[in-house]
Image (spheres, rainbow, N blue to C red):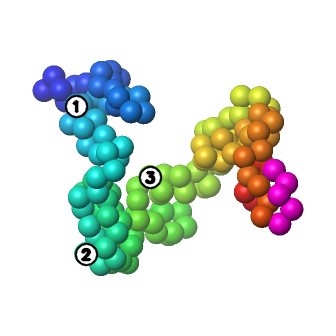
């Protein structure tokens, strides 16, 4: 019970020694650490792609089955993962939960905000294959 209650307390006493991500339960940290080990003991029986975690392989296998278990109540779009549905539903609510701390522009997805922030950083991590110019976005 004490271990379970850590989920609700906000405490995350277990830290991955590689990436410093924190966890409320030791078993979740150990499962996470397989990502860094290079081990991929789980194999998709359809395409032979390998995975570090069984749960990730199971989620991947939905691609082959055609199953899309999550349906948007508003527009009936279907997706494979619950997290993708939550992100999709932000389109209907108009919510933009991520805000650039420099210019206050808002975004639905964190990855889009991070990409946007390259504009302010002066970094240009992408290179054009044709002219070799460095740019801040792949798009």
Q: Nearer the viewer, residue 35 or 12?
A: 35
The Cα–Cα distance between marks 3 and 2, rounded to whole angstroms, is 25 Å
Q: Mark 3 — residue?
A: 83
Q: Mark 2 — residue?
A: 45
**The disc label shown at residue 38, or none:** none
Residue 8 visible to the viewer: no
Q: Mark 1 — residue?
A: 26
Residue 23 image point, x, y percent: 32, 30
Q: Nearer the viewer, residue 24 or 41?
A: 41
Corner quadrant of residue 25: top left
Corner quadrant of residue 66: bottom left
Which span is picked out in magenta? 130-134
Q: Earlier in the sequence, mark 1 or mark 3?
A: 1
Residue 75 image point, x, y percent: 55, 67
Q: What secondary structure prevails in the magenta region?
A: loop
Residue at the image position 66 percent from the left and 41 percent from the top:
114
Residue at the image position 41 percent from the left and 65 percent from the top:
80
Residue 130 image point, x, y percent: 83, 66
Q: Earlier in the sequence, mark 3 or mark 2?
A: 2
Image quarter where the C terminus lies is bottom right
Task: Say whether residue 60 is magenta.
Answer: no
């Amino acid at each position: 019970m004490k271990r379970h209650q850590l989920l609700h307390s906000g405490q995350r006493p277990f830290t991955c020694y590689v990436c410093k991500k924190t966890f409320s339960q030791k078993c979740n940290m150990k499962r996470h650490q397989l990502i860094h080990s290079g081990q991929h003991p789980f194999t998709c029986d359809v395409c032979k792609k390998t995975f570090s975690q069984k749960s990730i392989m199971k989620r991947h296998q939905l691609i082959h089955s055609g199953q899309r278990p999550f349906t948007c109540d508003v527009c009936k779009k279907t997706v494979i993962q619950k997290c993708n549905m939550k992100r999709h539903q932000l389109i209907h609510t108009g919510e933009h939960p991520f805000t650039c701390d420099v210019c206050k522009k808002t975004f639905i997805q964190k990855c889009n905000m991070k990409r946007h922030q390259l504009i302010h950083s002066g970094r240009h991590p992408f290179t054009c294959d044709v002219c070799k110019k460095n740019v801040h976005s792949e798009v």
